[in-house]
Image: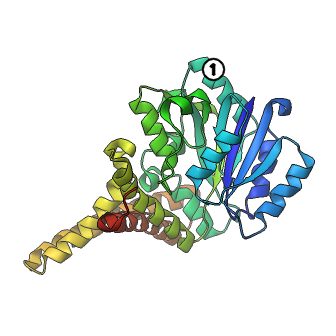
Amino acid sequence: MLSVICPIYNEEKYIAKCIDSILAQDYPKDDLEVIFVDGMSTDRTREIVTEYTAKYPFIRLIDNPDRIVPPAMNKGILASKGDVIMRLDAHSTYASNYFSVLVKALDDYGADNVGAVCRTDVLNKTPKALAIKEVLSNKFGVGNSTFRTGVDKVMEVDTVPFGCWRRDVFDKYGLYDVRLVRNQDIELNKRILRGGGKILIVPNTYCTYLARENYKALAKNNFGNGKWNILTVFYTKQFDSLSIRHFIPLAFVLSLILPLLCSVIYWPIAFVALLSLLAYLGLVGAISAKLSISKNLNFRYLIASFIVLHVSYGWGSLVGLLSLPFQPKK
């Protein structure tokens, strides 16, 4: 049996689309259970899921008073019956062959975790939202994450989103780390790799992540991601819990702030910050101009999206770094 686990919290805008894509799967429903683990949503999420559980007996809803993803996944894993576990995200939809392709690849290649490319889309096709979508799919925007940039063959990778494991993987490597508000999937995958496991990405299916559509939501989400890059390393005591690409925005923010602080002692050092800023803006401008022409996107929204993404991510990492002396021991 395949047990699909999906943590949810206040997902009323997205949850129906997610469930409809689950119902459209070509995987046999008599060999499937879907467990939604709700962090005590305050919107209509529970009501919407309950409407589906009343119609489809293989869909269940359980509670997660802890609200965050790691306890939700652990509760779902422990409540599940399947010998194969899959993790979904309610902000996404899934190609109709997503379940069947990942489960087959798990058997065919003997991997410990199998995932697929995660495309980015938006619900509302406004010029600003389309610019954000493009930036979140662009190598300069998100680094060289293979699951975002795409593959044309089966590849070994360091992480995948919304993967598929045999149950005994959790017996061998442990459950999700409940200390981590973000980066829990990356950390689990790094743990698997350190233990000699294999993680694969396959080309013949995909999921579609529905991105935030305004700068405030984009900044809030990526500030949290950046902050938890630092805290993930702090709590796990493993620098390789993440990859170098996760710390590049922090390096950029520091290249602006540190020279300005040092300029109090020796003012010409401030030019280092100016050069860093001009180099970044020049690169962002060139990439945005190319994307604007080739994909008919708004130039100003592209520049703003890159800046919001990188600065909020880097600022979050800096705040995480400065907060380390005040972190509770866990």
State whether residue 169 appears in this view.
yes
The secondary structure type at the circle numbered 1 is: helix
The answer to whether 101 appears left or right of 234 in the picture is right
- Image quarter (top left, top right, bottom left or bottom right) of the N terminus: top right
Q: Quadrant of residue 41?
A: bottom right
Residue at 42% x, 68% y: name it.
312
State whether residue 278 appears in this view.
no
Q: Position of residue 76 (x, y in %)?
A: 67, 44
The answer to whether 9 appears left or right of 271 in the picture is right
Residue at 55% x, 33% y: name it.
170
Q: Position of residue 224 (x, y in %)?
A: 47, 64
Q: For mark 1, does the 10 Å Cα neighbourhood hold few (<14), some (14 to 19), or many (20 or more) residues?
A: few
Q: Quadrant of residue 298?
A: bottom right
Q: Mark 1 points at which residue?
A: 107
Task: Identify residue type, mark 1.
Answer: Asp
Observer-nearest residue: 178 or 290?
178
Q: Residue furthest left?
A: 266
- Image quarter (top left, top right, bottom left or bottom right) of the C terminus: bottom left
Q: Position of residue 95 (x, y in %)?
A: 72, 40
Q: Where is residue 231 in the image (x, y as percent from the top left)?
A: 38, 57
Observer-nearest residue: 171 or 110?
171
Residue at 45% x, 56% y: name it.
141
Q: In which quarter of the image is residue 99?
A: top right
Residue at 84% x, 34% y: name it.
29
Observer-nearest residue: 257 or 107?
107
